Amino acid sequence: MKYPSLQIRFLGTGTSSGVPMIGCGCQVCHSTDPRDTRLRSSILVSSDTTTLVVDTGPDFRYQMLRENVKSLDAVLFTHPHKDHLAGLDDIRAFNYIQQRPIDVYADALTEEAVRRDFYYAFSDTRYPGIPELNMHPISLEDFVVGDIPVTPILVWHLKMPVMGFRFGNFTYITDANRIDPSEKEKIKGSEVMVVNALRREKHISHFTLQEAIDLVKELGVPKAYFTHISHQLGKHEDIRKELPEGIELAYDRLVINMP
């Protein structure tokens, strides 16, 4: 199958508290390396005709301004935690500019949270300036956004189901510590994958650095980037030197081109 050429831009690569973390005095939070400054995790995926974002965390407005994003066709949500959802209200700027609703793709659990947290967008009494959203329920069936094919991948964030997404030969997974064998098969054959690597120490609901490395090796994906990184992992440059060939830490504003 021929896929469209895609550009992947990392809008944020940090965990729920971001890096630097409020009030923290550690070396990572005080690093002068811009790669150690991490907004909440999100990516922008663009083809020649379609632009979508995966997750709208608390930093969404700033991320859109920083990357000078002028148009947006859709939002895909991975799960309903606030560090992936909280910025959705700022979608209304695109509503105003584009004069149309934004398509939002979410599983049932996340759609419930969107309708609860942004209830005013779904009220019978609508007032000017509210977000205009076209909700599209998703399951594990493939779908297409514009000209971008999407394969949902179910992963587990402890007991919470989270949606990873494969766009052509690029796979994006965040907030996971377990993937069932059948879903791993969907990842195999990717040319590039992104997966969360929170820290070195064991975590209840996230892959550790070593677990993420082991997953990439198991799946045989030739190029991988780690995201959803906490200040506990260490400085970007120090960790970079430890990683196996073909594996890198992602960082904010990194761009990957998928021909």
Image (cartoon, rainbow, N blue to C red):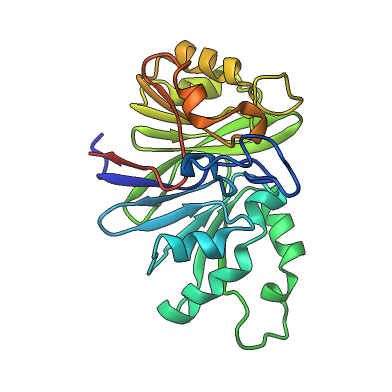
Residue in view at x 34 percent, y 37 percent:
168
Q: Position of residue 149 (x, y in %)?
A: 37, 44
Residue in view at x 73 percent, y 56 percent:
112
Q: Position of residue 253 (x, y in %)?
A: 42, 48
* Quadrant for the C terminus in the image: top left
The answer to whether residue 99 is visible is no
Judge whether 165 appears above or below 242 on screen. below
Judge whether 2 appears above or below 54 on screen. above
Does residue 215 appear to the left or right of 68 in the view shown?
right
* Quadrant for the N terminus in the image: top left
Residue in view at x 44 percent, y 19 percent:
241
The answer to whether residue 80 is visible is yes
58 or 101: which is nearer to us? 58
Total marks shown come to: 0
Q: Position of residue 131 (x, y in %)?
A: 60, 74
Judge whether 85 appears above or below 94 on screen. above
Q: Position of residue 108 (x, y in %)?
A: 68, 49
Does residue 178 appear to the left or right of 75 in the view shown?
right
Judge whether 148 appears above or below 104 on screen. above
Q: Which picture quadrant has residue 208?
A: top right
Residue in view at x 60 percent, y 23 percent:
179
